[in-house]
Image (cartoon, grey):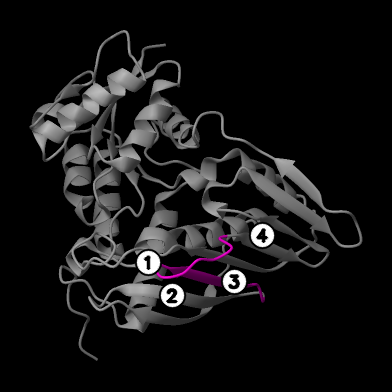
Amino acid sequence: MKTFGWALVGPGKIARRFAHALSALPGSRLVAIHGRDAARATAFAHQCQDQWPDPAGAPRVSPDLSALLADPAVDAVYIATPHAQHGAPVRAALLAGKPVLCEKPLVPCRAEGEALVALARERGVFLMEAVWTRFLPAYEVLGSCLRAQAIGPLRALESSFCFPAPYDPHSRLFDPALAGGALLDIGLYNLTATRWVLEQALGHVPELQRLDVQGLLAPTGVDLRVQGLLGFEGGVMAQFLCGLDASAPNALTILGERGSISLPRNFWESQQLVLRPQGQAEQWVDAPWRINGFEGEIEEAQACIRAGIIESPRMRHTESLAILGWMDRIRAQLGVRYPFEPAPPLP
């Protein structure tokens, strides 16, 4: 099978993890890189070749995004810029007919996400949000347990994702112009895990009937810490906490009628889970990554693109839009609005 060629837009920290996974996947390679800073992009290409040598040579550096998108060696594009800057390169790639795997969140708000999804469907070009968590081995095991009702019918779940970040009003975490805040950066993992658990356990995501949130804002006006309670049709409830000013267990715990299951450490990248059936000894299950965890989403994107479909059945467009919609509602409750967002409608 022909080698699958990837282009990378935004050679930063997260892109290194992508490049590492790609280098270890047979039949896949990084062929081109684009960044706003040509020197930084060139240094990234050299570092890739030094750490993960490719017999075909280092990836090409393209200062011009249009030229990169016209390259016939590029089979798909991975977007790894800061999330406030996702929209323009995603749109350019879709217009050029190049499939896209875009880092999470797809974009900062649902309205922009809807426009990109509509464009992907109009052009018949693959688009997927890179929520790597959903493709980890631990989640495959967890999904099997939930579908088999290993802890009985689902009742509730709770998750936390917090870390203390030094305050810098100009950083991507705290600058409103860069869509800063805990929710978009890390709270997305709490919400995507919630939706995923519901679908695995119930076969669908029930209607969200209650959304209550409290939060603390940073001096720049973005969300520093968010705590939420979600109530769903049928009685299942979910709690989450995300924050840039605290430490937390960073666990996901799922409660059933006859036991619980936990991803006890860093649930978004978990390699282990604990099954606690009521009245029985707990069972620890190891589910390690094959490379660094990013391999699953890369393989999924490649398989879908080769199959000629425009969305992943495991990370559908509707999922990305639903999560963006939840985050819009949460920010509205907290009074957080980015300067590039349209003003809310008059009452």
Nearer the observer: mark 2 or 3; the answer is: 2
First-in-chain label (2 vs 4)? 4
The quadrant in which residue 180 appears is: bottom left
- Is label 2 in contact with label 1 (beta carbons under 8 Å)? yes
Task: Kindly identify which residue carries mark 3.
Answer: 238
* Type of amino acid at the residue the image marks with label 2: Val
Q: Residues within 10 Å of mark 2 (few under 14, many from 20)?
A: many
* Type of amino acid at the residue the image marks with label 1: Ala
Secondary structure beneath label 3: strand
Task: Kindly identify which residue carries mark 2.
Answer: 226
First-in-chain label (4 vs 1)? 1
First-in-chain label (1 vs 3)? 1
- At a point 41% along the width and 15% down the height, the residue shown is 27
Query: Above or below — where is 277 with respect to 272?
Result: below
Task: Kindly identify which residue carries mark 4.
Answer: 202
Q: Residue furthest bottom?
A: 347
- At a point 37% along the width and 34% down the height, the residue shown is 18
* Type of amino acid at the residue the image marks with label 4: Leu
Quadrant where the image shows the C terminus: bottom left
Is residue 183 visible in the rendered image? The answer is: yes
First-in-chain label (2 vs 1)? 1
Marks 2 and 3, how far apart in space? Answer: 14 Å
Q: Residues within 10 Å of mark 3 (few under 14, many from 20)?
A: many
Q: Which residues are magenta?
A: 235-250
Q: Residues within 10 Å of mark 4 (few under 14, many from 20)?
A: some
